[in-house]
Image: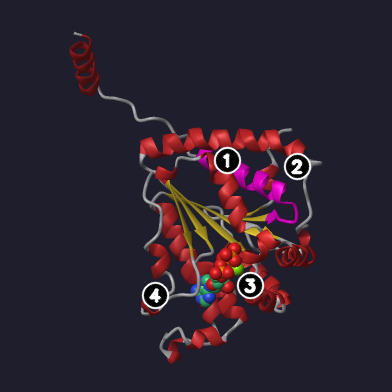
Amino acid sequence: MKTDKLAKTFCVDSGKHFRLKDFDPASTGHWRSKEHAAESLQEGICRMAELQDKLYAQDRWALLLIFQAMDAAGKDGVIKHVMSGVNPQGCQVHSFKAPSDVELQHDFLWRTTCDLPERGHIGIFNRSYYEEVLVVRVHPDILKSQKTPPSLVGKKLWEERFEDIRCFEKHMARSGTVIRKFFLNVSKKEQKRRFLARLDEPEKNWKFSAADIRERGCWEDYQKAYEDMIRNTASEHAPWYVVPADNKWFTRLVVSTVIVDALESLQLAYPTVSDEKRKELAGARKELVK
Ligand code: ATP
Ligand code: MG
């Protein structure tokens, strides 16, 4: 089955009329089953590997992939599966937890800026600066530990953070970093099922964290925060993809399609060799076969 329109279906590149409830976490588009999607997923992964090779060789563009989601939505699994075909030399994954003391000495974009992908590379953020308008918004107490001068923490704080993020992403896009942002949209019911599996299946016990259950208690606040975040930070140069996450196989298919589309749009090509270089290669060849 063709994946042509798949990326577009879940793309939000203008937040104006965005409503989270218009996106069904259980959707699987026209795909009926995991087996049905397997071939398309495999094709996507192979294509991604070819394109990454050119991205690396051309050394002009960088690709930044941002993953945000509620716990157990499948961020780790998507990253593992979708990137299984790419060359690790040109791809780095960074996970962002609660900021350290050193990180709190700086502005909220600082720590992620240090880990942005260099030209020719793919950078994956497992959580990101978007936590600053999600967990921090849902738990405003965190703000107190952030050391921002109190006179700068006003009523417009969230608007200001959205503006900072928009400007930052515009700047990155203008410098050659292509940004694609994924919100893995899992339902509350499916999250419960996955948490229960973490409790009931010994090989999944290690994934369980009591903090995840506490965050689940704030489900509605998080949904509002995600909706507002997408409304305020979706743009053509840094779109959000609201990816259905109740079926892991479909999440992976959509994410791989979006990445392939993003790389295809760059019309990547291997660098061409100058006449002088060609002469040098011919000389080296002669020498070798002598
Ligand atoms: P997994 O549970 O799959 O290992 P995870 O991304 O949930 O992955 P955890 O260590 O469980 O990793 O959680 C990281 C925590 O750090 C999350 O609760 C997240 O909200 C929190 N966090 C990330 N960035 C910030 C931030 N800027 N301020 C406060 N908390 C943050
Ligand atoms: Mg967690």
Closer to the N terminus: mark 2 or mark 1?
2
Q: Is residue 107 above or below residue 4?
A: below
Q: Position of residue 40 (x, y in %)?
A: 68, 35
Disc on the earlier residue, 3 or 2: 2
Residue type marked 2: Lys
Task: Identify residue for label 4.
Answer: 103
Q: Quadrant of the N terminus?
A: top right
Closer to the camera: disc 3 or disc 1?
Answer: 3
Which residue is denoted by mark 2 in the rendering? 34
Q: Amino acid at mark 3?
A: Ser
Query: 275 or 36: nearer the eye?
Result: 36
Q: Which is more foreground, mark 3 or mark 2?
A: 3
- The residue wearing badge 3 is 209
Indicate the secondary structure of the residue bearing disc 3.
loop
Q: State how far apart marks 3 and 2 are (Cα).
A: 28 Å
Mark 1 or 4: in front is 4
* Left/right of residue 16 with respect to residue 275 in the rendered view: right
Query: Circle 1 is placed at which residue position?
Result: 261
Specify the segment rendered in magenta. 243-265
On the rendering, which quadrant does ligand 1 occupy?
bottom right
